[in-house]
Image: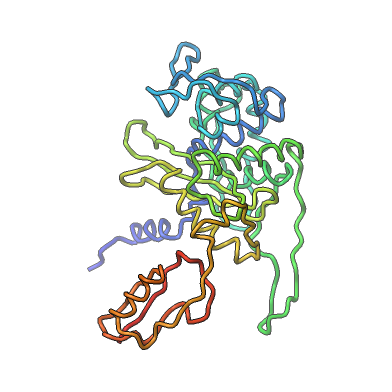
Amino acid sequence: MELYSQKEQQEYLNQMWRNFTINDTYEPGSTFKIFTSTMGLEENVVSENDKFVCTGSKVIAGRTIKCWRSPRSHGDETFVQGVQNSCNPVFMEVAERIGASKFYDYMIKFGFKSKTDIDLPGEAIGILHSKSNIGPVELATMSFGQSFQITPMQLLVGASATINGGYRVTPHLGKEIINDTGDIIQTFNYEKGKQIISTQTSERMKKILETVVSEGGGHKAYIPGYRIGGKTATSQKLPRGSGKYTASFLAFAPAEAPKVLALVIIDEPKGTYYGGVIAGPVMHEILENALPYLGIEPVYNEAEVKLDETQKMIVPNFVGMTSKDAKTFAKEQGIQVDINGEGEEVGAQFPLEGESINKISKIILYTH
């Protein structure tokens, strides 16, 4: 007896192999504030030190639209602080200064109404209002990433333009072809793409977004020795009031000359659902592994050099010790160990004796 009909099987298989990154659209929420900021700087309607006041909400065409911090407020803040605080009223004000027509034109420039042309099938495009239907309320909600939907890949492509000098790139999966002996037999070259914002605006955005990680809501992605920029988001899913959220974190590094751009999306998190809180640590782990893998070495400032997590140590030998002696020795030396197995003697360890590791890294001991 079949558990599922042929149609049901096909539907389950489609869902199993569905690539959310390009096949599905979602409301990006506060990660979209990157674009509202970029538009404002490019149009010269806002600058880094412009003053704003958050009262917890803003009245648009007779409708009260709240800041995420409501009923509390952010009070007086500069534009940069508004980005760090992810303050909705700041972005509503910036979008108002830009105007609906230009705001929409920039969304087209950033590619939210077209495919990215990535080398994968089944790509969707964004779902936007028509320009004629964007009134004051629609513009206000669009400014902080609501009332339209885009794919995660569209978000990444658009965000890359804000930090790469202003060029809208086409994402590709292939870099080169290597034969079975490891020789490169073909290298792919791709066009730089069309410049959609100025290099000056891109440089300003890199610096602003770096402060989101160093001083704002993205601090959980901070890694000593690396300059990281990014933006968090916590988006309430439709229908509003359902209690379901999407938490996300978009980040790039090194901030001064980006080589990696990443997006973490956690769909319908349970319990805590704030992007900076739950997606931030995931982004931290991704970049912590990716940056050294790419050969990008950390450069520590004076304060970071003194942190425990930047201190190095040489792994001692635990093999041959009893579990009890290994624990005692580790405690005396300030070393963290994790003992695996029920045996009385340490038979192996990882990392091996003599390797250099961070002082706060954990050494795994295997007993027999």
Q: Residue furthest front?
A: 332
Q: Residue at x 48, y 66 (%)?
A: 359
Q: Position of residue 17 (x, y in %)?
A: 45, 60
| Total numbered circles | 0
In this rendered view, identify the residue nearer to me: 86 or 242.
Answer: 86
Q: Position of residue 131 (x, y in %)?
A: 61, 25
Please say if 144 is above or below 288. Answer: above
Horizontally, is 357 left or right of 274 in the view?
right
In this rendered view, identify the residue nearer to me: 124 or 171.
Answer: 171
Please say if 330 is above or below 272. Answer: below
Q: Position of residue 301 (x, y in %)?
A: 62, 52
Q: How is the image coloured?
A: rainbow
In this rendered view, identify the residue nearer to me: 193 or 254.
Answer: 254
Q: Position of residue 316 (x, y in %)?
A: 46, 79
Horizontally, is 6 left or right of 43 in the view?
left
Q: Residue furthest top?
A: 62
In this rendered view, identify the residue nearer to me: 17 or 73.
Answer: 73
Q: Check the picture and name the quadrant holding the N terminus.
A: bottom left
Q: Check the picture and name the quadrant holding the C terminus.
A: bottom left
Image quadrant assignment for residue 63: top left
Q: Residue at x 42, y 69 (%)?
A: 362
Q: Residue at x 52, y 51 (%)?
A: 21
Please say if 147 is above or below 274. Answer: above
Q: Residue at x 48, y 82 (%)?
A: 353
